[in-house]
Image (cartoon, grey):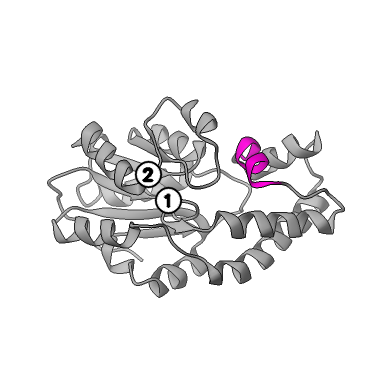
């Protein structure tokens, strides 16, 4: 999906999907443990996951296994995770307050977009099904391998917005992972990190950007740092 970027009175927000707008962390944990079981690995708790999770994902497995997974192990883990996750995700909903925040910003003439590492072909239908896709000027999911981080995808996403008038200094990335802050820095944008997803507060604070417990706080911080 791509629509024309229009000038905004406030900062342009680039939202993350999984763990940020979409409250799916419990589905992620269940799918992760289902994939671990296929290789005889012990299950992981939510707290342990939030302590260790990182992107690129093979590094997360390295933290758990003490070594990088082999190519064959990675293929099993990746395929199994996605197979279980997309079934479990059908039971998940938007994060509290997300729909109202998105609608209010659009009604105020403020722009926002969505940049996610979820596969693009699966992302569009699920965003559409939750009735919020019209609030975004652009939606980009992942089209390449799932082993990479978000930095280069964010660069392509922002380049498309820049072509229609977006200034990176007026862009704030809102996500739940350290990788979101890395991706924001990569393109010269700001970042605000939300504690409701894949990382613990302690992990997120290491990024040196604002860390918040609600999406409303995230928007308020975005306005403060780039408004």
Q: Which residue is mark 2?
A: 174
Distance of mark 1 from mark 2, alpha carbons? 6 Å
Circle 2 SS class = strand
Q: Is residue 55 left or right of residue 124?
A: right
Q: Which residue is mark 1?
A: 16
Q: Is residue 42 visible?
A: yes
User: In the figure, residue 68 lies in which quadrant?
Assistant: top right
Q: Main secondary structure of the magenta part?
A: helix
The magenta segment is: 45-53
Circle 1 SS class = loop
Q: Position of residue 34 (x, y in %)?
A: 75, 60
Residue at image coords 69%, 43%? 58
User: In the figure, residue 66 lies in which quadrant?
Assistant: top right
Q: Are marks 1 and 2 in contact (CB under 8 Å)?
A: yes
**Which of disc 2 and disc 1 is earlier in sequence?**
1
| Quarter that holds the C terminus | top left
Q: Position of residue 109 (x, y in %)?
A: 14, 56
User: In the figure, residue 133 lies in which quadrant?
Assistant: bottom left
Q: Which mark is residue 182?
A: none
Mark 2 surroundings: few (<14), some (14-19) or many (≥20) residues within 10 A: many
- Residue 56 sits inside the magenta stretch: no
Q: Is residue 212 left or right of residue 74?
A: left
């Amino acid at each position: 999906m791509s629509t024309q970027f229009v000038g905004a009175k406030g900062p342009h927000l680039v939202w993350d999907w999984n763990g940020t707008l979409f409250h799916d962390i419990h589905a992620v944990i269940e799918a992760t443990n289902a994939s671990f079981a296929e290789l005889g690995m012990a299950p992981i708790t939510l707290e342990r996951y939030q302590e260790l999770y990182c992107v690129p994902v093979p590094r997360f497995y390295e933290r758990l296994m003490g070594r990088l997974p082999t190519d064959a192990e990675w293929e099993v883990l990746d395929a199994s995770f996605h197979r279980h996750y997309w079934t479990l995700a059908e039971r998940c909903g938007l994060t509290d307050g997300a729909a109202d925040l998105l609608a209010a910003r659009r009604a105020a003439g403020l722009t926002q977009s969505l940049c996610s590492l979820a596969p693009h072909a699966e992302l569009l239908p699920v965003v559409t099904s939750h009735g919020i896709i019209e609030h975004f000027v652009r939606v980009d999911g992942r089209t390449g391998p799932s082993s990479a981080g978000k930095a280069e995808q964010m660069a392509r996403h922002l380049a498309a917005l820049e072509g229609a008038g977006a200034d990176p200094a007026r862009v704030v990335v809102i996500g739940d992972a350290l990788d979101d802050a890395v991706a924001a820095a990569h393109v010269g944008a700001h970042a605000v990190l939300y504690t409701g997803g894949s990382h613990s507060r302690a992990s997120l604070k290491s990024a040196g950007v604002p860390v918040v417990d609600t999406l409303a706080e995230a928007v308020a911080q975005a306005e403060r740092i780039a408004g």
